[in-house]
Amino acid sequence: MGTSKINSVKKTHLDIKDLILILCIDRDNDIGIKISRQGPIVGREENLKTAVNLAIKDPSESDANCIFGAIKEYDKQIKKNENCQILTITGDRDVGIKSDKLILRQLDGFINSTKYKITECYVISDGAEDEQLLPLIRSRIEIVQSKRIVISQSVPLESMYYTIINFSKTIIEDPKLSRVFLGIPAIVLLIFTIFGSAGFRLIVGLIGLFFLIKGFYLETAIESMYNEMKNSLKTRKYSILLYLCSISLFVIGASGGYSAVQSALAPDIIVKSAIFIKSSALFFFLSAISAGIGRIFSKQNYKKNFFPFLTFSSLCFSVIYILYQISVFLIDNTVGYNKILIAVAISALLVGISIFLEKHFK
């Protein structure tokens, strides 16, 4: 008798202290829009009235079935003699930050106003959209169990729909992703529109250029040149003209080399590469020199950058000169190795002198 009385006292004390919350979420505020009822909606009777009115207004509304599911869970917990409460909270038609703030404000208001300690929370939802709030709810309530009320919806299809919607929003809002998933396809479509079937070769060439830049880690150099061109344009410096001249010379060289390869009868890929280099080498060298001069003019102290530019020019000349002589040999190997050796010797001498001058005057 005495033991039974003690257990009864303990059970009563536990019921007063602890509370199970049955939480129903209407993130897009269908309840407010269709029957003009705003959250929070507390208690079984109020939630039952809301669900009935919503079902009468729109029999296909899944939020009504969600509330009915919450009521069923409430009755189940009451039969177990648990201290339980139903809460329905509503958001806003503009689903996102605005609606989530409204929902969390209502939830925090209920948590702060109740005299009980919420130990368990059953979240009753009608789909993946409402379940996106689960991490925020878990940050406020210790235990959360989620149940989804599915009526006539296809669960995988709905989950896929929200995944696509969220991914689309991320692409639009993130500049890096938008360049990849929107910018690149736009460029490809424009190339096909302008050049027709010939655009395919141009696209393949651009992909090859992209791999070349990534493979040799040229992003920093290209980004630096782009920033200098942009700054030159903003500050109205003449270096922008030299940069444009450099790009033009590079395009002319590449175009001339391409034309020479197309008209060549040699089937060997090595010989064709040599023809391309021989035809475009001078323009590539002038392009590099033009870009180097433009970089000097973009700096404040011209004299300080003269000798580094001299070394840069010597290196560019040496590389182009040696490649040119190797190309001549590959096209006609009767000329011998002498010109290649002379090119290497002259190049080594020029680079050595320029490096010496740079270190000496620095």
Image (tube, helix red, strand yellow):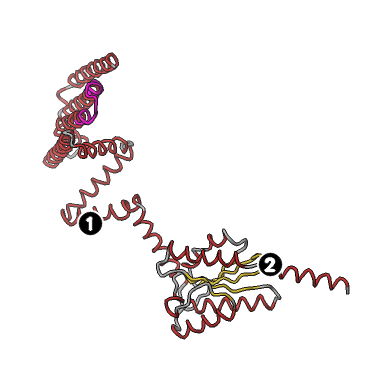
The x, y position of residue 149, in whole percent, is 53, 75
- Direction front: furthest residue: 113
Residue 115 inside the magenta-drawn segment: no
Residue located beneath label 1 in the image: 189
Magenta residues, start to end: 294-309
Q: Quadrant of residue 213?
A: top left
Nearer to us in this view, 225 or 342 = 225
Q: Quadrant of residue 173?
A: bottom left
The x, y position of residue 128, in whole percent, is 48, 67
In terms of secondary structure, where does tag 1 sit?
Answer: helix
Residue located beneath label 2 in the image: 18
The x, y position of residue 49, in whole percent, is 53, 83
Residue 297 inside the magenta-drawn segment: yes
* Residue 318 visible at all: no
Q: Amino acid at mark 2?
A: Asp
C-alpha gap between disc 1 and disc 2: 62 Å
* Residue 350 visible at all: yes
Q: Quadrant of residue 41?
A: bottom right
Q: Residues within 10 Å of mark 1 (few under 14, many from 20)?
A: few
